[in-house]
């Protein structure tokens, strides 16, 4: 089996590679979304802490 035959996937390459791409995107989103959410939460907490320090 050659590399081109492998990449062609017996005529199903479009479906196979699309499935891999979708799975990869989902995995990246599942890793990146919590990181961004945590960063936003920490920024909000810091902003609230500064605000309460200024008020007291």
Image (cartoon, rainbow, N blue to C red):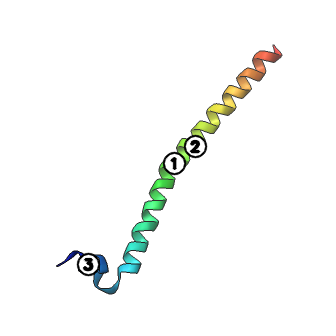
State the residue at coordinates (38%, 73%). 17
Callouts 2 and 1 close, C-beta under 8 Å: yes
36 and 6: which is toward the camera: 6
Q: Residues within 10 Å of mark 1 (few under 14, many from 20)?
A: few
Secondary structure beneath label 1: helix
Residue picked out by circle 2: 36
Is residue 27 shown left or right of residue 46?
left
Q: Is residue 44 above or below residue 1?
A: above
Q: Distance between the Cα atoms at labels 3 and 2?
A: 39 Å
Q: Residues within 10 Å of mark 2 (few under 14, many from 20)?
A: few
Secondary structure beneath label 2: helix
Q: Distance between the Cα atoms at labels 2 and 1?
A: 6 Å
Residue 14: image x %, image y %?
40, 79
Secondary structure beneath label 3: helix
Q: Is residue 46 above or below residue 20?
A: above
Is residue 4 shown left or right of residue 26?
left
Residue picked out by circle 1: 32
Residue picked out by circle 3: 4
Residue 31: image x %, image y %?
47, 49
Q: For residue 50, which quarter of the picture? A: top right
- Residue lying furthest bottom in this view? 11
């Amino acid at each position: 089996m050659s590399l081109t035959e492998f990449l062609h996937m017996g005529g199903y390459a479009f479906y196979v590679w699309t499935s891999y791409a979708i799975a990869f995107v989902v995995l990246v989103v599942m890793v990146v979304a919590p990181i961004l959410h945590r960063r936003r939460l920490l920024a909000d907490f810091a902003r609230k802490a500064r605000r309460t320090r200024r008020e007291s």
